[in-house]
Amino acid sequence: MRKYSIAILSALALMMGARSEACTNVLVTKGASTDGSNMISYAADSHQLFGELYFKAGHNLKNPGMRSIYNWDTNAYMGQIPEASQTFQRVGNINVHQLVIGETTYGGREELWEQDGAIMDYGSLIYVALERCKTAREAIGLIYELCSQYGYASEGESFSLADKDEVWVMDLIGKGNYGKGIVYVARRVPDGYICSHANQARITTFPMDKPQECMYSPDVISFARERGYFSGDDKDFSFADAYAPLDFGAMRGCEARAWSAFNILCDGVFTYMDETGAELSRPAMDFIEYAMGHDRSKRFPLFVKPSRKLSIEDVARVMRDHYEGTPMDMTTDIGAGGNALPYRWRPMTFKSGDNTYYNERAIATQQTGFWFVAQSRGYLPDNIGALIWFGCDDAATSYLTPMYACTSRIPLSFREGNGDMLHYSATSAFWMCNRIANACYRAYDMMAPTVQGMARKWENACLQKVAAWDQAALAMKNVKAREKYLTDACCSAADEIFAQWARLEEFLLVKYIDGNVKAQNEDGSWVTNGNGNIPDNIRQPGYSQKWKDAVAADHGKTLIVVEPK
């Protein structure tokens, strides 16, 4: 999602890369996954974005006419482009041919953000490409073509693209009013490896003579030379350094999230290839000074090999991360309050005395609109293989549920128009998950484990459901019958988990009211004193020791318990 430019800390120029609205992507190749699928995860993070599952059916038209383009961030009308005679159905960010596209906005050089007369914003590029392309390579080519013809109307972007065979990462930025369109570099993630990006351009140098591994605009280097961003030999050209120079915010607010994703999925050891193709391994902590914004020279690799084959659960775990177990762990300092809350409300920085300090921005965040883990399962027919696990709001306290891209309808809880950011809907998953999350924020260490346990239980059950649905659908020879079966199955599951989440909110209120924790029997019933519905064995966990020590230091002279004279 777009991160609006904010001129804070101008004297230090710290925050160009760490806006308050940001996204995280993880890219997994089929050789790195447990089931042989290519996967992309995406959290669409914005304080203004409503979480819903976008749906558009495909068409075949003799006279398609024109297509109106509306800016995804602002809904402003941008202009028109010719509609394609054939388009493909898309559900969220996956289409029926198993093409997946995600994004993160990195901004980059401000003078390149505005392009007079430009029509194509980054969101429109994603959804037009999903409607018109079958492969990641096709999508990269179409994105470049559309921007060249109609202009680019957004800041610097990183796109994640996956199809049945390949996974690609693409860094692009507009030419401002110094030319029309974009410059870009796209690199194929080597099979068996993973990639991650989080609001910072990550492609540095790249192979210029290997079209199977790398695509780029013909003027990506010459344009940088013209603008004074680069003056060395072509072989030393780095896209990220030329078009999105690093600062503290880009490293601590953005690259740190990609580092954390790698740290989790690689079990603390980054295995990667050097320029000669030799495989090297180094501890993740060798790169921590870069992730923390302290040392530009310790940049970590673009691609790493995970320590094990990765599952949907592994990737979902990453999307729920708050830097636990690292120096940036958000649950352990006094900013977590008395109940280990792993969130810091905005703005991103605060001052104390003469110093400025940073509020951490982890992968899981309160301002998520929607998030997903999408799979391109090339070993299955397209109308079974294209699968998106979709969720709304904060990933740490919400659930994922599977949706096939061949579905003919969207369940009510995810349906577009069922509520918005200014209008509450009691049947919207976005609003229900927000209710759960905001309940947990009051006593996170007590309540969040309950919610997270239920989400894991549901998602594990859905893995079994999907396996059964796949096999049942494969046995159906009639395509329409297969698609109806999968539609009914995933919509019924979405209805089921929404009902569970509604009951969960009621349970949280009863169990954790007023800072108490009511005891339960093994069968889930409440422990009572035997004289009616009067709870017994109530715990009162109170606050963390760090919080108690801080309160004592701040106000202890008044609060101290002493024997009277």
Image (spheres, rainbow, N blue to C red):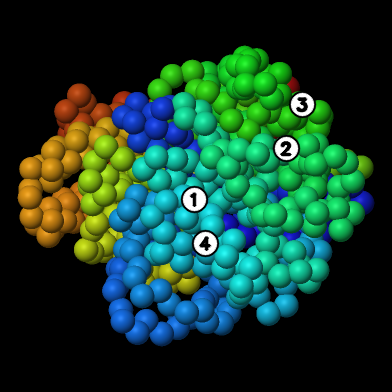
Q: Tell me residue 204's x, y (percent).
A: 72, 39
Secondary element at tag 2: loop
Question: According to the image, label 3 marks what residue?
Answer: 298
Question: According to the image, label 4 marks what residue?
Answer: 142
- Marks 1 and 4, Cα distance to the nearest angstrom? 9 Å
Image height check: is 470 above or below 159?
above
- Please tell me which residue is depicted at 35% across the width and 35% down the height of the picture: 37
Image height check: is 296 above or below 136?
above
Secondary element at tag 3: helix
Q: Tell me residue 168's x, y (percent).
A: 52, 43
Give the amino acid type for the residue marked by disc 1 in the picture. Arg
Question: According to the image, label 2 marks what residue?
Answer: 205
Give the amino acid type for the residue marked by disc 4 in the picture. Leu
Instruction: Give the mark nearer the N terminus: 1 vs 3.
Output: 1
Q: Tell me residue 357's x, y (percent).
A: 79, 41
Name the front one of labels 1 and 3.
Answer: 1
Choose between 387 and 22: the one closer to the eye.
387
Residue 107: image quadrant is: bottom right
Bin the neighbour count of mark 1 within 10 Å (Cα to Cα): few under 14, some 14-19, many 20 and up. Answer: many
- Residue 518 seen in this snapshot: no
Question: According to the image, label 1 marks what residue?
Answer: 137
Secondary element at tag 4: helix
Name the front one of labels 4 and 3.
Answer: 4
- Please tell me which residue is depicted at 62% across the width and 21% down the height of the picture: 277
Bin the neighbour count of mark 2 within 10 Å (Cα to Cα): few under 14, some 14-19, many 20 and up. Answer: some
Quadrant showing the N terminus: bottom right
Residue 339: image quadrant is: top right
